[in-house]
Image (spheres, rainbow, N blue to C red):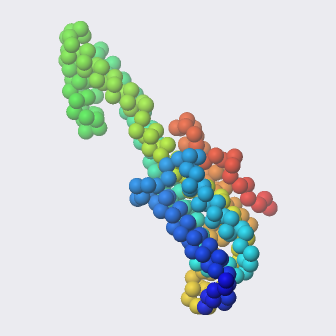
Amino acid sequence: MLFFNRRSGIVNVKMIITEEKILSNIDKVQRMINPSNKKQIIQLEEDAFFKDLIDSIKTYLTEYPKKKNFPLSVYKASYGLVEYATNQFEDNTKQIEGLIKQREANITFANNLKELLLNCQAKQKDWKAGVKQIIGKTSEDIIEALVIVGKAKDPELDNYKDAVKLIAARISNLEANLHIEIDMERIEDRSKALSYIGIEVAEALKGIPTPVDTGAEAKEEAADFENQYMEETRFEVKPSLWQRIKQSRLVRALAYITRIKVVLDVQALPEGDKK
């Protein structure tokens, strides 16, 4: 069965349906990586549906029979998806950087709190001044506990032991940074999905020329979009976005400071053209 399309002439109905389906799949992927979406992707390795969606998009891009007549709607939607994923990845990078700084600050404060506790226990002359310096930087219960330790004359009293336990527990929490680790793992999983889009979809788009539209405005918009994408990600222009991410100072810092699995599997990223 044939179907007439005003833009491209007579085409196969199956291809029209496929085009609509791919546009729907692109929209689903974009919603899955939207940080405001409650049902966003959580773990890339365990989300077969997400991978299937990306595979369908990649297959459509690579196996489309006449790439000179590639649908403008799919072309723009695909580039839009890569651009959106890129922006989200950059946002994730900023969040990771903030979490790293917060973790460093927590560890520093934990060390200071340890030293202050020892000063309070030893009744050092400056223990009161030390306690005053951290007012506003920690909770009131910790301040009160330090005062109890500093003023206590008998370390065997229950309130003294309870105060020491409370302070020790806070120091342990600061060193563990459990909530930060959880946030980092969550962001890591999102970044894996975003980089997966960049690797699979952006690579497939390289073989498709800019589609031509009958409208001058649409043509100019597509050309601008193409130029922006090439400037950002095309391997033959300069190292890809994902290559730059792989080599970035932040990824190296994340590997060293957090000592958890890095956001990206750097060995799996494309090396790009070497010229």
Instruction: Determine which quarter of the picture holds residue 174.
Output: top left
Could you say which is closer to the camera, residue 26 or residue 191? 26
For this orientation, the residue located farthest to the front is 1
Residue at 69% x, 61% y: name it. Answer: 239
- Relative to 265, is 93 on the left or the right? left
Q: Position of residue 75 (x, y in %)?
A: 62, 75
Residue in the picture at 53% in, 47% down = 43
Quadrant location of the N terminus in the rendered image: bottom right
**Relative to 151, 9 lies left or right:** right
Where 275 sits versus 134, above or below?
below
Residue 85 in the image: x percent, y percent? Answer: 54, 61
Q: Identify whether 30 is placed above or below 3.
A: above
Q: Which residue is drawn at 20% across and 11% down?
A: 157
Can you give x and y, in whole percent of width and height, for residue 230 in the image? 66, 71
**Residue 7 visible in this rendered orientation of the protein:** no
Q: Which of 145 and 90 is in front in this view?
A: 90
Q: Residue furthest right?
A: 275
Query: Residue visible at 36% across and 27% down?
Result: 171
Q: Say how many tags the image has.
A: 0
| Above/below status of 33 relative to 162 | below
Q: Can residue 70 be seen in this view?
A: yes
Q: Is 113 above or below relative to 200?
A: above
Residue 227, by quadrant, is bottom right
Report whether 190 appears left or right of 230.
Answer: left
Q: Which quadrant of the figure contains the C terminus? A: bottom right
Please provide percent x and percent y for residue 201: 64, 63
